[in-house]
Image (cartoon, grey):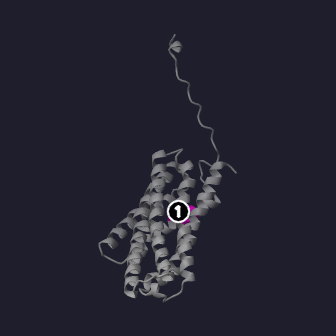
Amino acid sequence: MTPTRRSALAAGLLYLATIVSSIPALALIQPILTQPEYVLGDGPQTRVVFGIVLDLVNVAAAIGTAVALYPIIRRRHQTLAIGFVASRLLEGATLGIGALALVAVVTLRRDPGTASDETLVAASQSLVSLRDATFLLAPGLLASVNAAVLGTALYRARLVPRGIPLLGLIGAPLLFASTLATLVGVFDQLSPWSVVATLPIFLWELSLGLHLTLRGVTELDHDDPAPARRPDRTPADAH
């Protein structure tokens, strides 16, 4: 297995890991998101903690996809490769902030100190609101940006079948517009319109993860030796 194939395999598995971890995580942490008095001891704790752990796995896997794909993309489009790493790092960091906010709620639940119930609920709700904001920005605005950047690089270089990056290039503006509409209050984040706008990005990441895992990249599955650098001419060469 060539280094390029290993990088593609790692990226594919990490893309699949983001899907496998993020979807159940959202279901598991619902009590902390929907129950204002969760911090007072109302609701399950083990499932919520497990959901937060999966959120952190998603963060690591998301950043890992950029690290794994960087050496492949930079050989064709170095600027786009750097842009993808930067956007993916920012997305992962934003998701990480949201996960840490939920960790803080769990910590307050375990050790409330001398704070009153009203204070605890208010602090908890503020932390949950922070997590909601990060969830809107990271899988929304930032995910659309890195889909556009990576989709452009893959489409131009023809590293995967062009239908796959087309899903990302179509879904990126849809998701971006949906996120902006949610920010200004046109519809809710989990409304049918937002679900429809998110579907192409979900299919893009799923199909890309499967293709990279099973097939790799089409043009760089062999490691071409770097082109020999032409030696600089010296003044003596001119004679």
**In which image quadrant can residue 169 be found?**
bottom left
**Figure check: 127 above or below 60:** below
28 sits to left or right of 36: right
Residue 159 lies, in percent from the top left, at: 55, 52
Task: Characterize the magenta stretch by its predominant secondary structure.
Answer: helix
Magenta highlight range: 204-209
Residue 72 lies, in percent from the top left, at: 56, 49
Residue lying at 51% horizontally and 82% vertically, measured from the top left: 110
SS type, badge 1: helix
Q: Which residue is mark 1?
A: 62
**In which image quadrant can residue 188 be found?**
bottom left
Examine the structure image and report whether residue 188 is included in the region drawn in magenta.
Answer: no
Q: Residue furthest top?
A: 239
Q: Indicate the amino acid at tag 1.
A: Ala
Viewer can see residue 127? yes
- Front residue of 229 and 211: 229
Residue lying at 53% horizontally and 62% vertically, measured from the top left: 62
